Amino acid sequence: KKSYYTFQLKSAKGLIVVLKGIESTVPTEEIKEALKNEGFDVKSIKNIVNKDKIPQPLFRVEIVFDSFKSKKVKFTQFITCGISYTEK
């Protein structure tokens, strides 16, 4: 039996962003469309749930890095929510 593993190249990884404060009832397609209108290619988007599987007002978004790299933007409004930034 052979053991193996896979990995993703850094160049293939997207930028992971967590959007906070957007109601969990907002369809992910609406968020994806809003980001697309701002010029971002979205790889994936998922509503974050807690341990009891209850949707939270948090969305994990993976943006294609090339579409983000050339932009230095800060949104102040997104859909109908205000936005604040937290840097790590």
Image: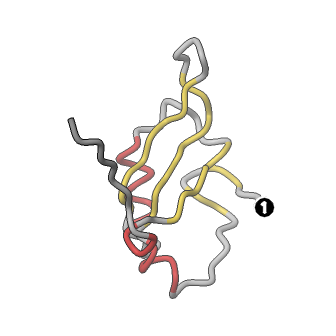
* Placement of the N terminus among the 4 image quadrants: top left
- To which residue does mark 1 refer? 88
Residue at x-position 36% and y-position 58%: 43
Choose top left, top right, bottom left or bottom right for residue 51. Answer: top right
Residue 55 location, x and y as percent?
Answer: 54, 24
Type of amino acid at the residue the image marks with label 1: Lys
Question: How many numbered marks does the figure carry?
Answer: 1
Residue 33 location, x and y as percent?
Answer: 37, 58
Residue 29 location, x and y as percent?
Answer: 35, 47
Closer-to-camera residue (50/3)? 3
Residue at x-position 58% and y-position 35%: 23
Residue at x-position 45% and y-position 51%: 31
With 45 as the anchor, is 78 left or right in this view?
A: right
Q: Is residue 6 above or below residue 50?
A: below
Residues packed near mark 1 inside 10 Å, few (<14), some (14 to 19) or many (20 plus): few
Identity of the residue furthest to the front in this view: 1
Q: Is residue 8 above or below residue 29?
A: below
* Placement of the C terminus among the 4 image quadrants: bottom right
Residue at x-position 41% and y-position 75%: 11
Identity of the residue furthest to the left in this view: 1
Choose top left, top right, bottom left or bottom right for residue 72. Answer: bottom right
Callout 1 secondary element: loop
